[in-house]
């Protein structure tokens, strides 16, 4: 039998080095509320569970027992931030006005998934005047994709 949500909250809180009072403050609830969650007397609901997950660096799905590799959105978010930092370091003031998003991003060493390439290719013929335009399109895709995954987890 797997861990319940209360035990998962406790495990993540301890791993994060937080006291119950610190988690309570971060989430906006009373300290005894966190104690009731961890003891199995109640469970966080609605937007509170999202705040708990964020404060603990876990996904809502992980708190509910989803242990699939892509369920840890904190890891995905970290990877996206690293990719964005890479883009910012590699950014040049301009990209050829005729460059399409995929070509512009690849010219700056950005690794793209097949899904990202397919989505960005739909913009072929719509020029990116700057690398920032191409990055904006990529971030739009990645934001949409993360939201889609969150809806699947919830």
Image (cartoon, rainbow, N blue to C red):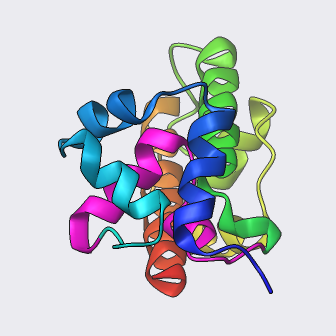
Q: Is residue 99 visible?
A: no
Asked which quadrant contains residue 24, the reply is: top left
Above or below — where is 77 with respect to 107?
Answer: below
Asked which quadrant contains residue 49, the reply is: bottom left
Q: Quadrant of the C terminus?
A: bottom left
> What percent of the width, then of the height, locates residue 6?
52, 65
Q: How many marks?
A: 0
Determine whether, in the image, residue 104 is placed left or right of residue 63: right
> What percent of the width, then of the height, locates residue 17?
60, 24
Nearer to me, 150 or 88: 150
The residue located at (19%, 43%) in the rendering is 30
The main secondary structure of the magenta stretch is helix
Above or below — where is 94 with respect to 72?
Answer: above
The residue located at (27%, 73%) in the rendering is 45
Determine whether, in the image, residue 130 is placed left or right of residue 79: left
Q: Is residue 35 visible?
A: yes
Residue 50 among magenta residues:
yes
The residue located at (27%, 40%) in the rendering is 31
Q: Quadrant of the N terminus?
A: bottom right
Nearer to me, 103 or 80: 80
> What percent of the width, then of the height, locates residue 37?
40, 62
Residue 47 among magenta residues:
yes
The residue located at (48%, 63%) in the rendering is 39
Determine whether, in the image, residue 105 is placed left or right of residue 9: right
Above or below — where is 152 with respect to 14?
Answer: below
Q: Which residues are magenta?
A: 45-67
Above or below — where is 123 with respect to 66?
Answer: above
> What percent of the width, then of the height, locates residue 105?
68, 41
Nearer to me, 18 or 120: 18
């Amino acid at each position: 039998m797997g861990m319940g949500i209360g035990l998962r909250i406790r495990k993540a809180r301890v791993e994060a080095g937080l006291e119950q009072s610190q988690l309570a403050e971060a989430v906006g609830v009373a300290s005894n509320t966190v104690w009731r969650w961890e003891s199995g007397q109640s469970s966080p609901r609605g937007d509170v569970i999202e705040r708990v997950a964020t404060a603990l660096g876990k996904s809502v799905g992980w708190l509910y027992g989803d242990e699939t590799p892509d369920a840890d959105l904190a890891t995905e978010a970290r990877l996206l931030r690293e990719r964005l930092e890479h883009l910012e370091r590699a950014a040049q003031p301009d990209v050829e006005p005729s460059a399409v998003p995929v070509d512009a991003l690849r010219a700056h060493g950005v690794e793209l998934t097949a899904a990202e390439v397919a989505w960005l290719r739909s913009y072929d013929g719509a020029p990116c005047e700057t690398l920032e335009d191409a990055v904006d399109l990529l971030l739009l895709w990645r934001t949409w994709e993360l939201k889609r995954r969150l809806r699947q987890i919830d």
